């Protein structure tokens, strides 16, 4: 007989994050999303992909800026490190995701982050706005399990390519003689 889980999605999300926090290592992921159902779905996709990196969840654009700037309750960078990946809902309360993307353009230390814009697909205009504001890629909601899984599995390839290109640029610079 299937036992019904009496915990809310918010409680389940919080428990998942707490369980993962003690054994996390490496660069982290920041999920900036106000929908508990989407957070639940994303966390489960990370778990299915066996991601060991820390995953932090925030629920407003203003909180995303505070986290990324390392201000207020997010000042302790050992507890709230600058992420390597941000999954950013474009339609959040207070400050929306497009405003967060435009803000990050003024922060050179945030330019190497992989910025994944998430939004309901309401036309090519939304996608163009996301890319013009600095998104690295775009995923349409409702999120498809396979698309999210492929994206998460592709993070490793993305960082490997970036590492290899940086290594190549450094070797080219060192071989140039004046």
Image (cartoon, helix red, strand yellow):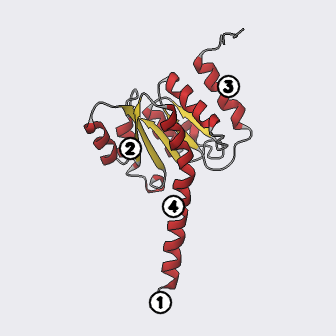
- Asked whether 66 or 151 is in front, the reply is 151
Horizontally, is 98 left or right of 148 in the view? left
**Could you say where residue 37 lies in the image, as x and y percent from the top left?**
51, 22
Tag 2 secondary structure: helix
Measure how far apart labels 4 and 3 are at the Cα level: 33 Å
Tag 1 secondary structure: loop
Q: Which residue is mark 4?
A: 162
**Residue 127 appears in view:** yes
**Could you say where residue 40 lies in the image, as x and y percent from the top left?**
56, 26
The dot on residue 15 is 3
Measure how far apart labels 1 and 4 are at the Cα level: 25 Å
- Asked whether 30 or 165 is in front, the reply is 165
Q: Are marks 1 and 2 in contact (CB under 8 Å)?
A: no
Q: Earlier in the sequence, mark 1 or mark 4?
A: 4
Q: Earlier in the sequence, mark 1 or mark 3?
A: 3
Q: Which residue is mark 1?
A: 177
**Residue 71 appears in view:** no
The dot on residue 101 is 2
Which of labels 2 and 3 is toward the front?
3
Measure how far apart labels 1 and 2 are at the Cα level: 39 Å
Which residue occupies 60% across, 37% down? 46
Which residue occupies 33% across, 46% down? 131
Tag 3 secondary structure: helix
Q: Earlier in the sequence, mark 2 or mark 3?
A: 3
**Could you say where residue 126 lies in the image, as x and y percent from the top left?**
29, 37
Which of labels 4 and 2 is toward the front?
4
The dot on residue 13 is none
Q: Are marks 1 and 4 in contact (CB under 8 Å)?
A: no
Above or below: residue 100 compared with residue 175: above
Task: Specify few, some or many for label 1: CA neighbours under 10 Å numbering under 14, 14-19, or 20 or more.
Answer: few
């Amino acid at each position: 007989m299937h036992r019904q889980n009496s915990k809310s999605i918010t409680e389940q999300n919080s428990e998942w994050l707490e369980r993962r926090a003690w054994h996390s290592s490496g660069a982290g992921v920041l999920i900036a999303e106000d929908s508990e159902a989407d957070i639940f779905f994303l966390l489960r996709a990370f778990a299915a992909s066996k991601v060991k990196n820390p995953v932090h969840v925030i629920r407003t654009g203003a909180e995303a800026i505070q986290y990324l700037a390392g201000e207020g309750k997010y000042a302790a960078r050992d507890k709230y490190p600058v992420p390597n990946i941000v999954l950013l809902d474009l339609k959040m309360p207070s400050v929306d995701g497009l405003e967060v993307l435009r803000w990050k353009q003024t922060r050179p230390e945030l330019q190497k982050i992989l910025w994944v814009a998430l939004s309901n697909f309401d036309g090519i205009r939304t996608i163009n706005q996301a890319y013009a504001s600095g998104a690295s890629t775009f995923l349409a909601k409702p999120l498809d399990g396979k698309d999210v899984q492929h994206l998460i599995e592709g993070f490793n390839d993305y960082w490997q390519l970036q590492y290899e290109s940086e290594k190549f640029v450094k070797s080219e610079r060192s071989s140039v003689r004046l």
